[in-house]
């Protein structure tokens, strides 16, 4: 508010008025708030009336800003809400939850990454704006690329590009994939102090709603058990749960064979001397182990017990050598027969030869690979195995002793505990016109029950050990190099960490795999990464790159919220964080909850105001684009 003076032509007197500025449809306009009067009417009161009322105007402006005055809106009972038939939404409703996404997007300097590259592209639209829209929509309203474009109007960011710009961008973005993954890694190291020494690896797949295969989308073993073409995704994750890198493979490619190209990719990207790879039994192969040790890295892989050799099964069942512990982790004596065992383990040291397939396809022996195996048993794991098996056993018992010529030829579901007996009713010898009898395989059930709760972890990672002097005597002191976090022992094929490492430390390291399983659930359930609605391979690559960025942002928001809320809860809160347009300059908040309250506190985003002006929202979003 300010004082404006006007000299009247007829009287020659100077009139004073209070004036305030306001915005209408993006333009600044002015209006008279109050008529003060003529200057000569106040000369007997003030030496300088104009200066006096300017000070009054400043006070009135300060009081108005300090007070939260109610917004008066005239509602028309017969008026219709502005519904957009193309987007099937009310265009008077806008989302402000994307401010949190925008803040992480800019803190990772993704806008800088794309801005620098679009300068060299022959395009008329803003590639960065397209990327932001794809990320916003993948998190808040996952769907097709056309649906994402139609939803652009609910954001306050400028997104004045057509649908063709979106599809054209899908062919451009994959060209920068490797550079972008390296850029994101560098940002995670600088901002979140990423520890790259331990990496978790797993493989999942994503299906397409198509019938015909092509060279990339192939039919394979679907995680969702769908008979549709799929693509395989290999993903590395760090110990904090943040995704590091990924790649896509044809759908018919075996999970195990993806590890070698992925490990080569991540070594190049991270440029770390020694890595420790953690993976489940699907990655346990001589080729993969040789890949690790020939590059002087460590591995922690699980090993199938039920599919193991009879010798290993007998070792697992043998009670000798196990160390037993209760729920609190306190050791239990073998003389103690009353305390319940929560978990137990024993260690087998081995030096073995392994085999790797060369470029010519022939298997070559790698001699003297050092490793040790931890045989681990968990009471909870055993109970879960019994619970998971109960339904199959019950169905198998019901199906047993039925007369059928259908030979049990697979090991799925109840068939695991069924076997077919083929016999002649008189001679009990197999003949052409046979009768078949399906019986319950009690021996198979007994064997499975004996292995419940057990799994084997194999590793070439070790810790410090006693120092041996020149005479070959142990001093009792630990060998130690303060300058190296780990070192490679070439004679043993082992990666030695510069600290004491117990078998339970290795088990704990392996248990971190649950985070990558959770990560896959987020991409599939929260981000709806499948089914995939694009068909060209470059656009498929762009789709999953967008999903990767969205996943990383969601993981960062989880951390910003103190890991108190799941990614699903955060996503739902951001999606509901909408405002409704009351008039051209005023918006009313429709939703606020504890998640938004936490993000407001941690990220300094002004969620939770009852009423926003358009300028206030623009300032809030502008703050998210500044590097903190």
Image: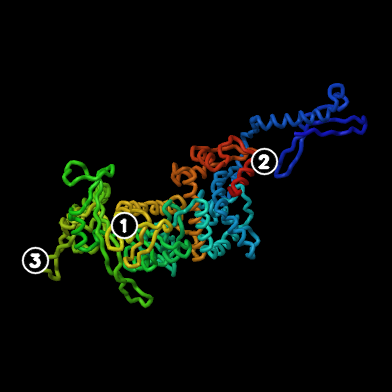
Q: Nearer the viewer, residue 69 or 45?
A: 45
The quadrant in which the N terminus is found is: top right
| Residue annotated with mark 1 | 465
The residue carrying pointer 1 sits among few (fewer than 14), some (14 to 19) or many (20 or more) residues within 10 Å by Cα, namely some
In the figure, is residue 149 to the left or right of 571? right
Name the N-terminal-most of marks 1 and 3.
3
**Residue at the spot x=67%, y=41% of the render?**
584
Please tell me whether mark 2 or mark 3 is closer to you in this view: 2
Residue lying at the far top of the rendered structure: 44
Query: What secondary structure is marked by label 1?
Result: loop
In the figure, is residue 202 to the left or right of 623? left
Q: Nearer the viewer, residue 304 or 228?
A: 304
| Residue annotated with mark 3 | 428
Q: Nearer the viewer, residue 117 or 440?
A: 117
Q: Is residue 71 above or below residue 575?
A: above
Can residue 72 be seen from the camera position used here? yes
Please tell me whether mark 2 or mark 1 is closer to you in this view: 1
In the rendered image, residue 563, in percent from the top left (x then y), is placed at 44, 44
| Residue annotated with mark 2 | 584
Label 1, label 3: how far apart the Cα atoms are: 63 Å
In the rendered image, residue 68, in percent from the top left (x then y), is placed at 64, 31
Q: Is residue 342 above or below residue 145?
A: above
Label 2, label 3: how far apart the Cα atoms are: 90 Å
In the figure, is residue 11 to the left or right of 211? right
Q: Quadrant of residue 230?
A: bottom left
């Amino acid at each position: 508010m300010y004082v404006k003076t006007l000299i009247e032509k007829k009287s020659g007197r100077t009139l004073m008025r209070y004036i305030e500025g306001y915005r209408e449809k993006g333009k600044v306009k002015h209006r008279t708030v109050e008529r003060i009067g003529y200057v000569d009417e106040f000369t007997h009161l003030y030496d300088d009336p104009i200066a006096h009322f300017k000070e009054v105007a400043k006070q009135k402006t300060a009081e108005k800003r300090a007070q939260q005055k109610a917004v008066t809106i005239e509602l028309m009972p017969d008026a219709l809400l502005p519904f957009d038939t193309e987007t099937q939404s009310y265009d008077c409703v806008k989302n402000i939850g994307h401010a949190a996404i925008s803040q992480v997007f800019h803190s990772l300097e993704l806008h800088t990454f794309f801005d620098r590259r679009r300068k060299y592209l022959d395009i008329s639209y803003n590639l960065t704006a397209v990327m932001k829209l794809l990320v916003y929509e993948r998190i808040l309203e996952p769907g097709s690329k056309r649906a994402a474009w139609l939803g652009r109007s609910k954001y306050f960011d400028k997104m004045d590009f057509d649908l063709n710009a979106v599809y054209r961008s899908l062919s451009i973005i994959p060209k920068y994939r490797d550079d972008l993954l390296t850029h994101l890694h560098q940002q995670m190291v600088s901002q979140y102090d990423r520890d790259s020494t331990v990496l978790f690896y797993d493989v999942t797949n994503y299906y397409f709603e198509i019938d015909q295969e092509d060279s990339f989308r192939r039919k394979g073993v679907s995680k969702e058990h769908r008979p549709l073409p799929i693509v395989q995704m290999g993903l590395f994750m760090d110990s904090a749960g943040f995704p590091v890198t990924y790649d896509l493979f044809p759908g018919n490619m075996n999970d195990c064979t993806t590890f070698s190209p992925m490990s080569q990719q991540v070594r190049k990207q991270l440029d770390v001397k020694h890595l420790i790879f953690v993976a489940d039994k699907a990655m346990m192969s001589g080729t993969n182990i040789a890949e690790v040790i020939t590059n002087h890295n460590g591995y922690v892989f699980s090993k199938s017990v039920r599919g193991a050799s009879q010798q290993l099964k007998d070792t697992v069942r043998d009670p000798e050598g196990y160390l037993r512990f209760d729920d609190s982790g306190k050791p239990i004596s073998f003389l103690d027969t009353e305390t319940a065992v929560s978990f137990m383990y024993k260690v087998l040291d081995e030096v073995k030869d392994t085999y790797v397939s060369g470029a010519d396809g022939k298997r070559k022996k790698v001699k003297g690979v050092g490793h040790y195996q931890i045989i681990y048993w968990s009471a909870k794991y055993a109970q879960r195995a019994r619970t998971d098996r109960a339904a199959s056993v019950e169905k198998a018992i019901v199906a047993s002793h039925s007369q059928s010529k259908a030979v049990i030829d697979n090991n799925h579901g109840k068939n695991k505990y069924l076997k077919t007996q083929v016999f002649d009713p008189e001679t009990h010898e197999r003949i052409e016109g046979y009768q078949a009898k399906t019986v319950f395989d009690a021996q198979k059930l007994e064997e499975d029950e004996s292995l419940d709760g057990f799994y084997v972890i194999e590793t070439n990672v070790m810790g410090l050990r006693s120092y041996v002097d020149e005479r070959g005597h142990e001093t009792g002191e630990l060998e130690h190099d303060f300058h190296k976090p780990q070192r490679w022992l070439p004679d043993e094929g082992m990666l030695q960490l510069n600290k004491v490492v117990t078998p339970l430390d290795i088990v704990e390291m392996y248990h971190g795999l649950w985070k990558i399983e959770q990560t896959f659930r987020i991409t599939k359930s929260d981000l709806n990464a499948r089914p995939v609605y694009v068909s060209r391979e470059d656009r498929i690559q762009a789709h999953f790159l967008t999903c990767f960025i969205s996943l990383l942002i969601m993981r960062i928001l989880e951390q910003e919220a103190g890991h108190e809320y799941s990614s699903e809860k955060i996503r739902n809160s951001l999606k509901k964080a909408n405002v409704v347009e009351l008039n051209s300059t005023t918006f009313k908040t429709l939703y606020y909850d504890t998640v938004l309250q936490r993000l407001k506190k941690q990220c300094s985003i002004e969620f939770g105001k009852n009423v926003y002006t358009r300028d206030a929202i623009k300032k809030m979003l502008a703050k998210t684009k500044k590097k903190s």
